[in-house]
Image (cartoon, rainbow, N blue to C red):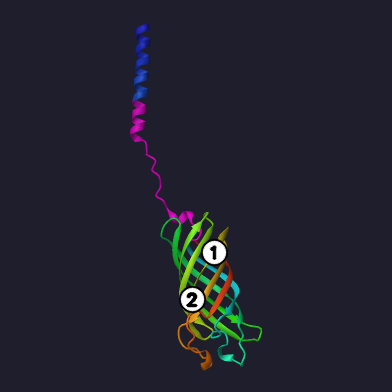
Amino acid sequence: MILARSLVFGTAAALLLAAGASAADGAIPVVDPAIDYASDNYFEGFYAGLYAGGAVNLANNLHAGQDYLGDWHDNRFNMGVVGGYNFLLTESILAGVEVQVGHSFNLSRQNGAEAIALARIGYTLFDNYLIYAVGGAGYYLGTGVFAFGGGAEWYLGDGLGLRYEMLAMGELGENNLPDAVQGVDGVSATKFAFSAVWHLN
């Protein structure tokens, strides 16, 4: 009886060990997924938004435009749309391109269009805060301009971000102003804008 009982227990133990070994051989190893920077960065991908702000003319050679009446209208209001794309270089550094198209006007009913293309590079802080620098060229109130500057954006959630940006601008060539102000070199105006941006990634 004792011998039979020992044989039963021994056989059961052997079967359990064999089953465990078989299960171990067939187990699927767990592999950590590859790091995907885009999944952790709110600013990657396409975005579009609206901006509103103003511009101050420092050298008096951009804002008078075709409606020059003998006095300078130094300040302008600006509003328009932005659109662009960001791609990640590292987990925190991104680069991209952006286009701004809008309308400029002042209290003397002088109006004009603006369209500027910008390259950008930025750095993300605390996952939802972006600081960036931009540079490019475009068209501003009848004049070809260069532009450079920077800004900061705060990601609020659900794709929405708020940002503040400043651009320094200067003419690329001669404009249609009187000879007294032609050929002013360097920065001529400073543009600032607040924007609401929707990230579409």
User: In the image, is residue 61 above or below residue 88?
Assistant: below
Indicate the secondary structure of the residue bearing disc 2.
Answer: strand
The three-letter code of the residue at mark 2 reads Ala
Outermost residue, top side: 1
Left or right: where 197 falls relative to 120:
right
Residue 139 lies in the magenta-colored region: no
User: In the image, is residue 72 above or below residue 154?
Assistant: below
Residue 39 lies in the magenta-colored region: yes
The three-letter code of the residue at mark 1 reads Ala
Span shown in magenta = 18-43
Instruction: Give the x, y percent position of residue 75.
Output: 61, 81
Q: Residue at x 37, y 6 (%)?
A: 2
| Disc 2: CA contacts within 10 A as few (<14), some (14-19) or many (>=20) | many
Q: On the image, numbered disc 1 is attached to which residue?
A: 152
Nearer to us in this view, 5 or 53: 53
> Mark 1 or mark 2, which has the lower sequence index?
2
| Disc 1: CA contacts within 10 A as few (<14), some (14-19) or many (>=20) | some
